[in-house]
Amino acid sequence: MKFTALALALAAAAPAAAEIYLKEQFDDSYTSRWTESTTWKSASEMGKWELTTGDIYGDAEDKGIKTTEDARFYGISAPLTKPYVSDGKPLVLQYAMRYDKDIECGGAYIKLLPGGDKFDAAAFGGDAPYGVMFGPDICGSSNKRTHVILHSDAKNDNLLISKDVPCEKDNVSHLYTLVVNPDNTFEVRVDDKVVREGKLEDEFDFLEPKEIKDPEAKKPDDWVDDAKMEDPESVKPEGYDDIPAEIPDPDASKPEDWDDEDDGEWEAPTIDNPDYNGPWQPKMIDNPDYKGPWVHPMVANPDYKYDDNMYKVCGGDGCSHIGFELWQVKSGTLFDDIIVTDSLEEAQAFAKETFFKKKDAEKEMYDKQQEEENKKREAEYAAMDDEEEEDMDGMFDEF
């Protein structure tokens, strides 16, 4: 009996096995799982996806899906193996992406989507409801961030993280991981290194403010806001307004060839008057009645209430699908190695088997390509210099 009780106690204390709601590494069968958006936009506005290793790779057999046409919308989605419901367990969303071209303007974010059996994959696009939107979005030099947008059932709204999270912009693969915990904390990781973490209430507007301005308070009528005042003893000097802003140039003289009959009466050009000091203003002194800026007193907000369920971004029937809906000015973004799970350790193990296994070889290939391109460029510049030198020699030979 004691053994049975101990066994039950150990079983109760053991952590629940991690659940995996989706693992995707994109092979030739991916179209049986993923559906392109065909009714979101017209066919002429939609770009095509390609299964490819991309321009660089760490494994010639490993492929991802890549955007291929500039200035196009892209939409594609897939069902999870079972819906993820935020109910006392973490949400871990992770994927790898790479810009094969220098990105000018375009998103590279992923979405977790509700809908279940009613989810319309063909119509999936920018207006489709979502539980999570996560990943890089770059447009120009100033707009460069990792989107972290979480759905709030209480507010029926999608909440953007209050302070931008940086993203990578180079041309090698990076791993993006979002963790939302049931204790209402979160983590954002890039290449499995934490770049932002904190409490949901501190970084998102899930809750009403704890304090508000006292609606009964108002600034007293006799409150003095002005730090300075006119010196009552400051008096405008007599004749101050008679001083002109400009005077005739005393060093100017009428030209010898000036003809008053033909040229008119000569007038000396004017210059700034060194004695003119602008419109008179009284001297300012410290205001003895100044009380400083009036600060509106704060009171407890009667509408504030802590919400234990902030983390439930996939509440109700949960999130049933995952997808990319993007606009890209310049294409060439590749996606791979997606996992949705309730365990960070499971996601890290998957990253070790996939992303990190390829990472160093990919970077080596990238560096080699860059070296070859630099040599080619240097050779082209050298050839141009030689041509210019020959042209110059030929020009001098003519003389």
Image: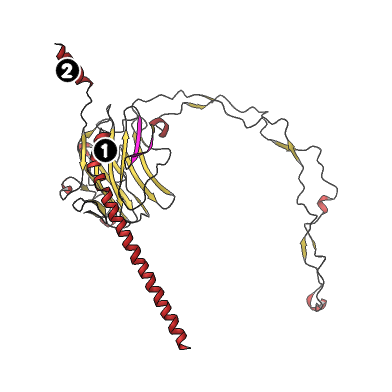
Q: Secondary structure at mark 2?
A: helix
Q: 341 left or right of 209?
A: left
Does the magenta run of residues contain 196?
A: yes
The residue depicted at 35 percent of the width and 25 percent of the height is 308
Vertical placement of residue 141 versus 397, above or below: above
Circle 2 sits on which residue? 7
The residue depicted at 41 percent of the width and 74 percent of the height is 385
- Residue 223 position, x and y percent, is 66, 29
Vertical placement of residue 350 versus 56, above or below: above
In the rendered structure, which amino acid carries the disc numbered 1? Gln
Question: Which SS does the magenta portion mostly show?
Answer: strand
Q: Which residues are magenta?
A: 184-197
The residue depicted at 33 percent of the width and 60 percent of the height is 371
The residue most toward the top is 1
The residue most toward the bottom is 399
- Residue 111 position, x and y percent, is 29, 41
Vertical placement of residue 140 versus 13, above or below: below
Color style of the picture: secondary structure
Does the magenta run of residues contain 317?
A: no
- Residue 75 position, x and y percent, is 26, 49
Q: Is residue 43 visible?
A: yes
- The quadrant of the picture occupied by the N terminus is top left
| In the foreground, 18 or 133 | 18
| In the foreground, 398 or 138 | 398
Circle 1 sits on which residue? 348
- Residue 83 position, x and y percent, is 22, 34
Q: Earlier in the sequence, mark 1 or mark 2?
A: 2
In the rendered structure, which amino acid carries the disc numbered 2? Ala
